[in-house]
Amino acid sequence: DYLASAKHNIIPSTMGCGSSTAATPSLDAPVKDSTASVKAAAQAPPAAAQPMAGTPAYAELKPAAAAAKGSKTVMILFGPPGAGKGSHAPKIVEAFKIPQLSTGDMLRAAVAAGTEVGKQAKTVMESGGLVSDELVVSIIRERIKEEDCTSGFILDGFPRTVEQAKMLDEVLAGIGEKVNHVVALEVPDAVLTERICGRWVHKESGRSYHIKYAKPKSLPDGAEPTEDNMKDDETGEPLMQRKD
C-alpha cells in the first residue's frame, strides 16, 4: 500500500474537492498524519511544521528531478468518483509539466490506434469482458515510452488493487524508476453522493456540469433538471447522466 508505507499529510483543498493526501513512498518511514506540508514532513517532525491552511498538499511537492537528477516524477492520483480528480489533475499537470495518464483514455487510444495491445483490448471489450491487468499494464508500459513522459507522468485510475500495484512496480523497476509521489483525494461519502447524483455530462466533449455547483445556462433557477432543460453551454446539445 503506497499510502501505508509513506509519511503523508492531509490538507483541506480550497477547490471544494475534499482533502488531498500527498505521500512520498518510503518503506522504512513511519505513517504520520499531519497538516504540515510534505516538504516540511520530510525535513522535521509534523509538530514543528507550520501548516498552510487551505492549500492542497501537492502544492508543496517538487518534481523528482529536482531532488534526484535523472529521476522521473512518477505520481499516482487516487480518489473515488466525484472526489475531484478532474479538478485537481490539470493543476498538477501544469505544476509538474508532465502528462496525466488515465487508464480509460489509454485503452481507447490504443484501440483507436490499432496497436497490437489495442486490438486485444478491443476484442475483450466488444465481448463485454473486463480487460485483464496484463493488458492494462502492457498499454501503460508502451505509453510511458512516449516523448511526453520523458520527465515523468501521473497515473489516474491505476493501480486499483495490490496485484496491479505489484505489476506497476515491476514495470517501473524495468526502466530504473519507481513511484515517488502519491496524491489521494479524500471526501465524505455524503458529499460524493451529492456530487455524483447531480453530475451531468456532454457526451461528445466530456464537459461536466452539476445541478448545484456548475449549472448549465439552460437550467432555470429553481427548476428540476430534465433532459429538456439540461443542455451543453457551447453546442446546445442534450446532456446526459452517466449510468455509473
Image (spheres, grey):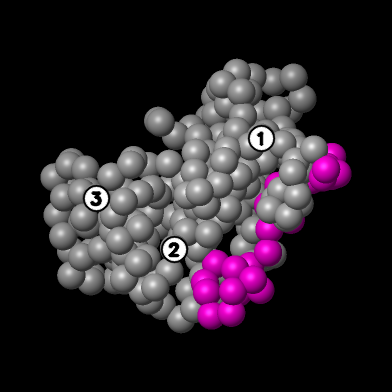
For image coordinates 55% across by 47% down, the residue present is 29
Question: Element under label 1?
Answer: loop
Residue carrying label 1: 33
Query: Can residue 224 be seen in this snapshot?
Result: yes
Q: Amino acid at mark 1?
A: Asp
Pointer 1: residues within 10 angstroms few (<14), some, or many (20+)?
A: few
CA gap between label 2 and label 1 equals 23 Å
Of residues 198 and 101, the one nearer the viewer is 101
Q: Which tag is nearer the camera, tag 1 or tag 3?
A: 1
Q: Quadrant of the C terminus?
A: top left
| Residue 65: in magenta span | yes
Specify the quadrant of the image occupied by residue 176: bottom left
- The dominant secondary structure in magenta is loop
- Of the residues shown, which amino acid type is indicated by label 2? Lys
Question: Which residue has dot 3 on it?
Answer: 133
Image vertical order of residue 21 relative to residue 225, above or below: below
Spatial CA span between label 2 and label 3: 19 Å
Rendered image: mark on residue 50: none
> Which residue, given by chain and number where applicable, does mark 2 sit on?
178
Label located before the other in sequence (2 or 3):
3
Q: Nearer the viewer, residue 168 or 126?
A: 168
The residues tagged by marks 1 and 3 sit, at their Cα atoms, a distance apart of: 32 Å
For the record, the magenta segment spans 48-73
Looking at the rendering, which quadrant does residue 185 occupy? top right
**Which residue is pictured at 41% across the width and 78% down the height?**
146
User: In the shown orientation, is residue 149 left or right of residue 20?
Assistant: left
Quarter in which the N terminus is drawn: top left
* Labels 2 and 1: the sequence-earlier one: 1
How many marks on residues? 3
